[in-house]
Structures are given as C-alpha cells and as structure tokens.
Image (tube, grey):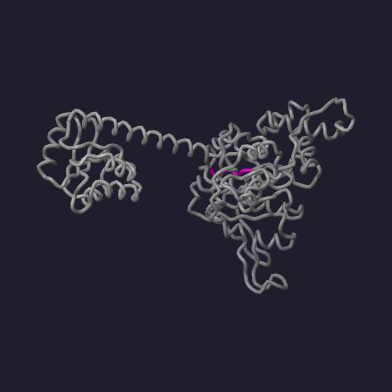
C-alpha cells in the first residue's frame, strides 16, 4: 500500500468519493466526518497522512492541525478547501499543515501530494528511530558516552550484568563507579532486590563493623536497639562497597569469611545469619600496590576481584567531554529555569583543553556554576571556573629558547603520562606498557599528580 490516509470531511459524499479514488490509487483510506472523531482515531490507530477539509462545523482543518501538534502526534496534514487563497494557505502552514489543496480536487495533484507526505512521514519516523538508536548507544543506564573506550565499557557491563560474579570497579574519583555498580544491579536477576551502598572511608573501624555486620541490642554502650547490618539489608540484591582499599586491615578477615560463608554474626549475637547478595566493590587506588605494601589482604583481593572493570578518566574520553557538558547544560537550565541552550565555541574549546582531574564530577560542578552565572543563551568563557578558563593545554616541552618556558623533569613526566593516557583512551594497562612501567608504578605516579 502507498500509505494509510485519514480522510476528514463533513461531506459524506466527498468522503466516499475520496475513499474510492484513493483506494484505486493504492492508498488505504479511512474516512470520518468530524474533526473530533479524527483526533480519537489518531490516538488509537497509525496513519501516514491526514487529509482534512478546511471548513467543518465542529473542528476545522486548521484547528485540527493545531490539536494534532498539541497532542504530540507526528503526522503530516494536507488541508483541502474550496476557498483557496494565499492568506488561507499561510494560516494553514502556520498551524502545522504539511500542504494545501484546493477544491475541486485534482486527483493527480492530490496523489502526488499524498505520496510526498507519506515519504516525509516515513523518513521522519526513520530519522526518529535512528536518533533513538544513537541515544541508546550513547547510554548505559545513567552512564553517558559515545567514545570508543566507553562503548567497550558498556559492552563489558552488558556481558557481566546478569551474572552473580563479584566485580571490582577501578577508576579515579569522579569517574562514575557507583553509576556503573547501579547499572550492573539493574541488569541483573536481582534488580527487584535492594541496592545498598557503603563508603568504607566514611566511618571509623568500630562503626564500620557494626554498619556491615549489624549488632544486637546492648552489644555496646550506645546499642539501644538492634541493627541489621548492610549484608542483611542487601539480601536478595547488591551490596556496593566503595573505597574498598580504605577498609581497615582488622576488618578484612571478617569480611573475607562473610563473603566465603555467606553468613554474618552481628556484633554481640550468638548465632550467624545467612544472606544472599552480589558484591560489587570499587577503588580509586591500586589494590595491587596495597597488597604488596601489606595494607590489603591478598586472599580478600582475589575474592572480590573475580571480574575487574576499569572506568576511564574523563581526559581520555575525547568528545564525551562536550557530550556530557551539553547534557549538564540541559539539566541545570531546566532546574534553574534559565534560557541557556548551548555552549559557545570558545567555551567548548576551553572545556576540551582542560585536564579534568576531578573527572565527570568536576565537569558537572563546572557546568552547574556556568549555567547559574550565564546571562546569554550560550555559556561563555567568562562563565567557566577560573582554573578551566585559565588552563593551558599541556605540551611536552623538551627545549626552548626562553628559559622561563622550561619546566621541571617531574612536570615533563606528568605531561607525557597524561599524553600517553589520552592516546590510549584511558587504557592504563596499555599506557603502562608504552611507558615501560608496571601498573602499580603508573598508579603511584598518577596519584602524585592529583
């Protein structure tokens, strides 16, 4: 069929005539004599084009165009009238009409107009479908990115999402480790269960033990009521332990036993309780180095590191910087109710050049500030934080005519490491090989630069 056409005309004889002619020319016409009934049909059935009479007693063609737009229905409308004039045509187009045909209707012209409208409708649908596919490819739940390194990350998360293996997520602060953990939870068979998060660096050892394993009433001075630990709270779901490298060495044997036995004994309790969780841990430091230094148990390290995922730093994600920046502009423009709809070319250049040591979190804060200060429709350089605005892109300078341009050996090293990381799209293992370093040494040098 050439297309499904909704014919709207209060003249029943005209409807019958158009149905016969359009069916003869390969279209599938459905006719109605009222604009209101046409709206109801459009809400429940798919059409490629609406062919509407301009003058109808309840809802004319121009008003029908406006109502279709109000309801968010993507549909070309061809308006038909016996009172053709330039003014009427302009009014119809302003209301959203796709085309304008006068009576008496020339069927050859109408057929041509309908075919063009059907083609336009299908092309629009195809573009919308492609846009949705592109948007899906850019996202993995709340993670956003179209760079090659992020697409690899999305594929890896997809592969292990619906498994029960323990996962260790590595990455600098602000790269989105908790977002990745939540994405894994949503992709798992435990998605209906709880997602419980803990920052191991946020609590002292005594409170951390009670928070993890729970306690009974009277177990210690301030234990006025029993407390179910996070292992039991996360039963049937996912427990996310952030900054696992900060876990006190004294608690590590108890954590290892809980993971292996799938049981915990709350502080002061006489019996152990069973739990069923998926464990996801995260760290912004090298656990290999922590194991070597004796700060982290090797057996616990291998138990939590069944699958390791590495989140790339923002500086290694290329065009994702502007993609994320535009996303945050839209977010905060809506939140602050401001007419800010983009980023100037000069400001975009500054965003791309900056090293972003605080990663996505720092970018988000910078854009929130910029939107709050922005007085124009687009963010300008002066709206950006000083350190972003004044940043000079790092170049490795080995020699120069002006002694004031020369830099220290340590700075040359840091700039070259950043250059290699950018070239390898944040792949630290590959960067370490290029630099002739082991991963632990590279992590140590990176931590010094932050």
Identified at 63% across, 58% down, the residue is 264
Relative to 107, residue 344 above or below = below
Q: Give left or right: position of 439 versus 368.
A: right
- Res 397 → quadrant: top right
The reply to whether the magenta stretch includes residue 387 is: no
Identified at 66% across, 40% down, the residue is 351
**Which part of the image, by quadrant, shows the C terminus?**
top right
Q: Give left or right: position of 54 versus 176.
A: left
Q: Residue furthest right?
A: 403
Magenta: main secondary structure equals: loop
Q: Nearer the viewer, residue 16 or 45?
A: 16
- Res 149 → quadrant: top right
Identified at 62% across, 61% down, the residue is 229
Residue 228: x percent and y percent?
A: 60, 64
Q: What's drawn in magenta, residue-wise? A: 163-168
Q: Is residue 278 visible?
A: yes
The reply to whether the magenta stretch includes residue 165 is: yes
Residue 73: x percent and y percent?
A: 33, 45
- Res 398 → quadrant: top right
Q: Is residue 308 visible?
A: no
Residue 83: x percent and y percent?
A: 20, 42
Q: Nearer the viewer, residue 76 or 29?
A: 76
**Which part of the image, by quadrant, shows the N terminus?**
top left
Q: Residue furthest left?
A: 13
* Number of disc labels: 0
Residue 376: x percent and y percent?
A: 59, 48
Q: Nearer the viewer, residue 449 or 284?
A: 449
């Amino acid at each position: 069929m050439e297309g499904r056409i909704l014919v709207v005309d209060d003249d029943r004889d005209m409807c019958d005539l158009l149905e016969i002619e359009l069916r003869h020319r390969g279209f599938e016409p459905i006719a109605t004599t009222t604009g209101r009934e046409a709206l109801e049909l459009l809400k429940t059935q798919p059409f490629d084009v609406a062919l509407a009479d301009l003058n109808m007693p309840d809802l004319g063609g121009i008003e029908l165009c406006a109502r279709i737009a109000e309801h968010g229905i993507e549909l070309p409308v061809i308006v038909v009238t016996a009172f053709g004039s330039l003014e009427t045509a302009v009014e119809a187009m302003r209301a959203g009409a796709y085309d304008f045909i006068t009576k008496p209707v020339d069927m050859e012209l109408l057929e041509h107009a309908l075919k063009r409208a059907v083609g336009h409708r299908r092309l629009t649908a195809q573009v919308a479908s492609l846009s949705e596919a592109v948007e899906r490819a850019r996202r993995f739940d709340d993670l956003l990115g179209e760079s090659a390194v992020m697409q690899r990350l999305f594929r890896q998360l997809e592969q292990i999402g619906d498994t029960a293996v323990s996962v260790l997520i590595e990455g600098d602060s602000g790269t989105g480790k908790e977002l990745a953990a939540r994405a894994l939870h949503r992709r798992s068979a435990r998605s209906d269960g709880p997602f419980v998060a803990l920052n191991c660096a946020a609590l002292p050892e005594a409170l951390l033990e009670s928070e993890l394993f729970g306690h009974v009433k009277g177990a210690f001075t301030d234990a006025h009521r029993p407390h179910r630990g996070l292992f039991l709270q996360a039963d049937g779901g996912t427990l996310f332990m952030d900054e696992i490298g900060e876990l006190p060495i004294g608690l590590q044997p108890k954590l290892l036993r809980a993971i292996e036995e799938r049981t915990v004994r709350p502080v002061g309790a006489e019996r152990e309780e069973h739990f069923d969780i998926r464990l996801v841990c995260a760290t912004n430091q090298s656990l290999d180095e922590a194991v070597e230094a004796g700060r982290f148990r090797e057996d616990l390290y291998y138990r939590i590191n069944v699958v390791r995922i590495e989140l790339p730093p923002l500086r290694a994600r290329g065009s994702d910087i502007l993609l994320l920046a535009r996303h945050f502009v839209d977010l905060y423009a809506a939140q602050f109710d401001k007419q800010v709809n983009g980023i100037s070319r000069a400001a975009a250049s500054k965003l791309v050049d900056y090293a972003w040591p605080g990663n996505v979190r720092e970018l988000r804060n910078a854009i929130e500030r910029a939107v709050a200060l922005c007085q124009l429709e687009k963010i300008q350089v002066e709206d950006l934080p000083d350190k972003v605005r004044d940043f000079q892109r790092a170049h490795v300078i080995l020699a120069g005519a002006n002694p004031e341009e020369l830099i220290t050996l340590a700075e040359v090293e840091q700039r070259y490491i950043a250059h290699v990381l950018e070239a390898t799209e944040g792949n630290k293992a590959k960067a370490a090989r290029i630099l002739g370093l082991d991963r632990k040494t590279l992590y140590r040098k990176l931590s010094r630069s932050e």
